[in-house]
Image (cartoon, rainbow, N blue to C red):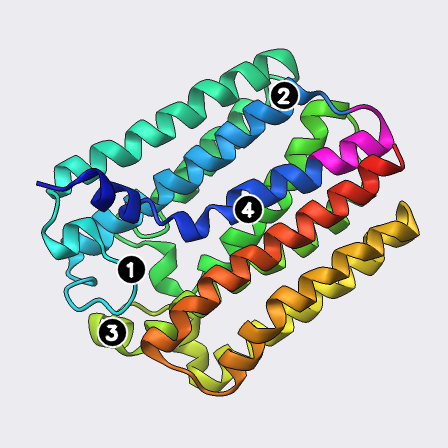
Amino acid sequence: MATPADWLAGARPRTLPAAVSPVLAGTGVAAYVADAVWWKAALALVVSLALQVGVNYANDYSDGIRGTDDVRVGPMRLVGSGAATASAVKRAAFLAFGVAGVAGLVLAATTAWWLLVVGAVSVLAAWFYTGGSRPYGYLGLGEVMVFVFFGLVAVVGTTYVQTETWEWAALYAADGIGALACAILVVNNLRDIPTDTVAGKRTLAVKLGDRGTRLLYAALVVVAAVAVVALAAVTTWTALVALLFLVVAGPGVRTVLSGATGPGLIPVLQSTGLAELTWAAAAAAALLACA
């Protein structure tokens, strides 16, 4: 029977900065262009965190029943390790999605009902990343969907529910946050190229190969830096402080480009998540200071 520590590990806490960061960035933009609505920001955070935990458990379940996690290099998987039954992990995933749904329903009811469609599509995207008969994560589309949902939708959506306006600043912030969220997935899939190849999981990393994936990781960090400049250009030059994320991301970039493999890449997951959080927190602080 899985222990609480096992369930916490299965939620993959190192990925949670990818859920917190878009809400921070989106709220910073909202505060700069209008006024932050803190209770809506809090609900947006609940939605984002619940979706992240839900997709982590859903991946654990789907990869586990397919046998993809039979030989695991990274963090423990509940189903693959046998610590929890597949049905229990599936229930945990849907419980998390349910929490996201309830919080999202409140946001939709107080902002715009069409947001329910966005929420429903987000849950479907989370499930079918590795779920269903033709999961898009096995077709090399995982990074695209992470950019869309944990970048564009999460950041722009967080700003919109607070301002009910379209803001270019939110789009530029979404580009930076989305790029770093993708980088987390890229390094995760880089680590798993050998096992994913054997399991028939055709991630983008498998398709690009080892060298191409390493270059993609570095390119995503560059995109995030360019996004800081774009954000500063339409808001305040003090937003350039978000370039401090490069200090956090730098060691991870060097590790990836140096050719590290397997367990050697695990610390890069954490450093990339912290780099994303630094990007968001620094940008939000600059925007809030000028609000």
How far from the left and from the top, in percent, is residue 215? 56, 80
Please state which amino acid type lies under the numbered disc 1: Pro
Q: Is residue 63 magenta?
A: no
Q: Please name whichever residue, 16 or 143, is drawn nearer the observer in this view of the structure.
A: 16
Q: Nearer the viewer, mark 4 or mark 2?
A: 2
Q: Is residue 29 magenta?
A: yes
Magenta stretch bounds: 27-35
Measured in 3D between alpha carbons, the distance from the residue under mark 3 to the one under mark 2, in whole angstroms, is 41 Å
- The answer to whether any part of residue 131 appears in the image is no
Label 4, secondary structure: give it: helix
First in residue order: circle 1 vs circle 4: 1
C-alpha distance separating marks 4 and 2: 18 Å
Q: Earlier in the sequence, mark 1 or mark 3?
A: 1
Which amino acid, mark 2? Lys
Which residue does the numbered mark 1 point to in the structure image?
75
Dividing the picture into quadrants, the one containing residue 217 is bottom right
Kindly report the secondary structure that dominates the magenta region of the rendered protein: helix
Q: Are marks 4 and 2 in contact (CB under 8 Å)?
A: no
What's the CA distance linking mark 1 and mark 4? 21 Å
Query: Residue at the spot x=32%, y=54% of the render?
Result: 135
| Mark 4 or mark 2, earlier in chain | 2
Q: Is residue 227 above or below residue 124?
A: below
- Badge 4 vs badge 3, beta-carbon distance below 8 Å: no
Query: Which of the 4 image quadrants contains residue 126?
Result: top left
Judge by depth and name the residue closer to the eye, 7 or 197. Answer: 7
Helix, strand or loop at label 1? It is loop
- Amino acid type, residue under disc 4 in the picture: Phe
In the image, which disc is placed on residue 195? 3
Report, in whole angstroms, how far the alpha carbon at label 1 lies from the one at label 3. 14 Å
Task: Pinpoint residue 189: horizontal percent, then vertical percent.
Answer: 39, 68
Q: Is residue 169 left or right of residue 88?
A: right
- Residue 40: mark in rendering: 2
